[in-house]
Image: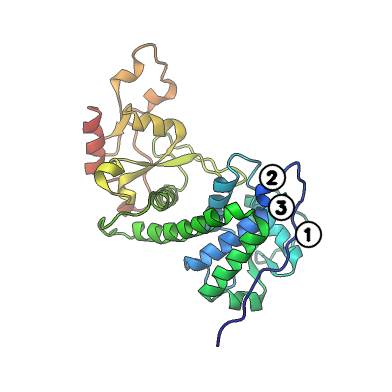
Amino acid sequence: MLNPPFTFPSIRQDTNRSTWTEETLGRAPYKPFLLLAVLDLMDAGRITENRIVPDEDLTDAFMLYWNAILPDRLRPSIHLPFFYLQTDGFWVLHPLSGKMLPATEPSSWKNVRERYAFASLDEAAFELLQNPLTRATARLELIRRCFVPALEKPLLELAKTQVSAFNYADKLLRETPAAYEKPVEKPVRDQAFRRVIVKVYDHRCALCGIRIISPDSRTVVDAAHIKDWAVSHDDSPTNGLALCKLCHWTFDSGLVGFDDDYRVIVARSITRDGNLPGHIQQFAHRPMILPERECYYPATENLAWHLQRFKL
């Protein structure tokens, strides 16, 4: 017997046309992006029970859509749809144990995590969405209802990339990652590698130690390959470093590296030609900020390759 079709009920959206463009039909896309993210997490096997946890996976899934469709436009405030979807009749908020259910809007994503254990869908809706074909139909209907036709294909491609990236990230996080076998699409690789490296370094720069996560869950660090992917075809955590913007540029420019003992080497050239390297020189001989698990430590052969490449 075929499952009955499912579509999300009508959702309330801000309709300030001076803020929202024709791409989103003049309406705020917060709720559609969050629902698309939930469907992606179901497809990736991240949501198997009727518990939508306000965790890093949900943040990453939401941000993929925001950054692709509305880059650098307003704040990607995921806390707003997580709270306000409860007004649409199929989304229920569940407070943390021992806490009352607040009536006021949360101030940030951090505030959401301080308040709520999870959200859940209407039970009948959740049961229907267990079927992959039903999810695909619900996704397509939601996209067609909330975005211009020109965005249908890009949004469907983003969903495909999202699920593939979650699966590839799982593969990379194994203690003994599988050897490189066949090309993985660059958008999938980039997203998965970033997710893995930021996770294993807990958002902390391996060189300077800075760790900042904004109220809307943006992180200060990038994911950097130690041995260039074009040379190594290696996205494993042992070929990656979490580095802030300045340290990333400094590392990629060969101005700093790490020895076999994970201590910082600073290039002598950094002080030439009137440069004022500021705090960079202070890192010389300091230990790298390493991941918590040793299996994710940078491979010394990769660090040696970087030193040799730049003659450090």
Say which amino acid is labelled 3.
Pro
Q: Residue at x 70, y 58 (%)?
A: 83
Label 1: how many Cα within 10 Å (few below 14, some 14–19, many 20+): few
Pointer 2 local density, CA inside 10 Å: few below 14, some 14–19, many at least 20: some
Do tag 1 and tag 2 residues touch (Cβ < 8 Å)? no
Is residue 39 positioned above or below 275 on the image? below
Q: Can residue 255 be seen by looking at this rendering?
A: yes
- Farthest bottom residue? 1
Mark 2, secondary structure of its residue: loop
What mark, if any, has residue 186 been given in the picture? Answer: none
Spot occupied by residue 297 in the image (x, y as percentages of width and height): 31, 48
Amino acid at circle 2: Thr
Q: CA distance from mark 1 to mark 3?
A: 9 Å
Residue 154 image point, x, y percent? 53, 53
Q: Residue furthest front?
A: 149
Relative horizontal placement of residue 22, taking residue 159 as reference (left or right): right
In the image, is residue 225 above or below residue 295?
A: above
The mark that comes first in sequence, 3 or 2, is: 2
Label 3 crowd bin: few (<14), some (14–19), many (20+), radius 10 Å: some
Percent position of residue 120, x then y: 64, 69
| Residue highlighted by disc 2 | 21
Q: Who comes first in sequence, dot 1 or dot 2? A: 2
**Residue position for label 3:** 106
Q: What secondary structure is marked by label 1? A: loop
| Image quadrant occupied by the N terminus | bottom right
Q: How is the image coloured?
A: rainbow
User: Residue placed at 58% from the left, 47% from the top?
Assistant: 69
Disc 1 residue type?
A: Ala
Q: Left or right of 86: which side holds 248?
A: left
The residue where tag 1 is placed is: 103
Q: How many marks?
A: 3
Res 289 quadrant in image: top left
